[in-house]
Image: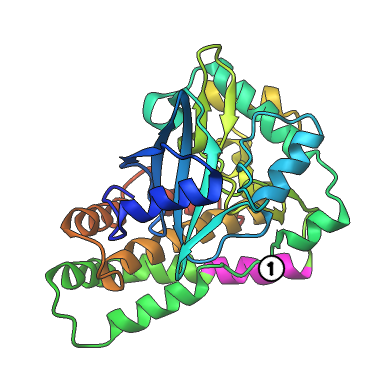
Amino acid sequence: MIERPKFKESKIVKGLVEGYGLADAKITFLPIGYDQFAWVYRVRAGDQTYFAKLRLGKVNSSVFAIPAALHAAGITHVPAPIRSQQGQAFVTLEKDYRLILYPFIEGKNGGRDGMTLDNWEGLGRLVGRVHGLTPTEPLLKVMSQETFVSFKEGMFQRVRKTIQGEGLTDPYAVHMADLWHKHRHAINDCYDRMTALGERLRADPPPFVVCHADSHPHNVLVESDSSVWLVDWDEAIYAPKERDLMFVGRSAAMGGTLTPSVERYYDGYGDRTLNRAALAYYRYEWAVQEFAEFAYAVLFRPDFGAETKQSSIDEFAGLFEPGNVVEAAHLDDVEG
């Protein structure tokens, strides 16, 4: 998130001291990311630097298991949480707040700072190796499994019901409701197509692989030697490969000329065959997630300030602009 949480930083430091043994820990808030349930910090302790994530709500039990399995398979450019002094993948601070600690990776952010063609090929190679992992039964037991029902379904329905009702008075909420009404036909169309494609895929699912589920360039770190790391595995899932490949570029599904970055990505990844129904489903599902999350941040998070609410409104409005997620979903639709 771009704004600090309404959570005392002294409690975070206490968690680092008592949970990880970092007696002289000092933290710096990093205003990055759009996950409205997580805030991140740089941690300095002695001559060591760490990356800490404060998460509101449950932590997926696979947050340590998946990176551990990838490391065991020789896939090392995936950061794994540092175990607490009690051997856990996180430390509970209070109520629903958890603290996860990682090694700090010095590098440029692929989304913010850009990626070279070599970086794109390296990312494709890394994702290909992840998809090639054969998960063990213990790993499958802790991983989320694709159901072809959006995991933001409940959030989406709550937002839509609230906006269709009456009584909104907060000016940011009123603005968000106006935008939702303005784009309601596009929103409903995306939701309906997602639902129809989900039914089709439940009846005839493609093969499943281990997916990062959020493998866009903003979750890529590029080191000085141009090697790439894929970070933030909180939403990893056992699903069709298209769950990750939707982030690469729509032209791969359309059978047209690939952009240089997409071409190099698939040079690294290898397999260029795609299930178009799955790709279209994930495009629509991503749009529905974005609708729900940005609206939820405005309507149901009184702990968020004006900066975060306005940013959520701006991001929501941008979803319907040319080249953004709504247009991309329609262009990759199997009926298109």
* 10 Å crowding of disc 1: few (<14), some (14-19), many (20+): some
Q: Amino acid at mark 1?
A: Thr
In the image, taking residue 224 as reference, residue 187 lies left or right, namely left
**Residue 196 within the segment the image draws in magenta:** yes
What residue is drawn where x is 54% and y is 21%? 260
**How many discs appear?**
1
130 over 310 or under it: above or below = above
- 254 or 76: which is nearer to us? 76
| Location of residue 327 in the rendering, given as x and y in whole percent from the top left corner | 42, 50
Q: Quarter of the image holding residue 75?
A: top right
Left or right, residue 225 beside residue 111: right
Q: Is residue 220 visible?
A: yes
The residue that disc 1 covers is 147
Q: Which residues are magenta?
A: 193-203
Q: Residue furthest bottom?
A: 166
Name the spot of residue 6 as percent of width and height, x first: 28, 60
Depth check: 188 or 149 in front?
A: 149
Seen in the image, is 36 located left or right of residue 307?
A: right
